[in-house]
Amino acid sequence: MDVSQKIARCYDTHALALYAHALVMTSDPADAEEVLQTVFTRLIRKPNALQSARDEKAVLMKWVHDAAVDLIRSNARRRDRNETWQANTVSPFAKTEDPDKDDYAKAAWEALNQLPEAQRSVVHLRLWEGYTFETIASTLNISINTAGSRFRYGIDKMRERLRPLYKELKDYHGCL
């Protein structure tokens, strides 16, 4: 029996039990699948790792346990980093003392999110990150001309969507 046949036999024999154990540990089907993939990737990289094992399934269960613990820790660190980042980052659309500015910011966010992804990325990188078109082009792997035209089309669409609110606020306040 060659290595691929051994791995296929191992998968056919143990995958369901390994997945169930991973699911119990992670409580998430996608995470359990990731754990299972990690275990079988390890086996593919070291196909002889089970050769001297007295209980193949027990070794694989240990690998599932270790991979699940690593994934849970990784997810917790990622969640902590995101929470810290969100707590320490001022959103360009964060609430202010002025409800009109809040309404305009919300409308700007909605207008940005209604853009096609390609335009949305360029507009965000240009306006909120301050990137040059050259940097945007390099980052998104597009030409400078494409970055410029996506920005122009995106801004035009946002202006069109925001114009009624801008006019309303301008009329109400006399100026903006």
Image (tube, rainbow, N blue to C red):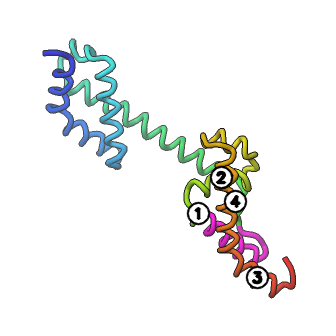
The residue located at (87%, 85%) in the rendering is: 174
Name the secondary structure under disc 2: helix
- Label 1 vs 3, first from the N-terminus: 1
Kindly indicate whether the residue at mark 4 contacts the one at mark 1 (C-beta within 8 angstroms).
Answer: no
Q: Amino acid at mark 4?
A: Arg
Q: Amino acid at mark 1?
A: Leu
Name the secondary structure under disc 3: helix
Q: Amino acid at mark 2?
A: Val
Q: Which mark is drawn over residue 53?
A: none
Q: Is residue 10 left or right of residue 67?
A: left
Whole-angstrom CA distance, mark 3 to mark 2, is 26 Å
Bounds of the magenta span?
A: 95-112
Instruction: Out of 71 and 118, give the one closest to the viewer.
Output: 118
Instruction: Out of 66 and 11, give the one closest to the viewer.
Output: 11
Q: Amino acid at mark 3?
A: Lys
Residue on which disc 1 sits: 115
- The x and y percentages for residue 136 are 68, 44
- Label 4 vs 2, first from the N-terminus: 2
The residue located at (35%, 39%) in the rendering is: 34
- The x and y percentages for residue 149 are 67, 55
| 10 Å crowding of disc 4: few (<14), some (14-19), many (20+) | some
Instruction: Verify whether residue 142 appears in magenta.
Output: no
The image shows residue 42, relative to residue 176, as above or below, that is above
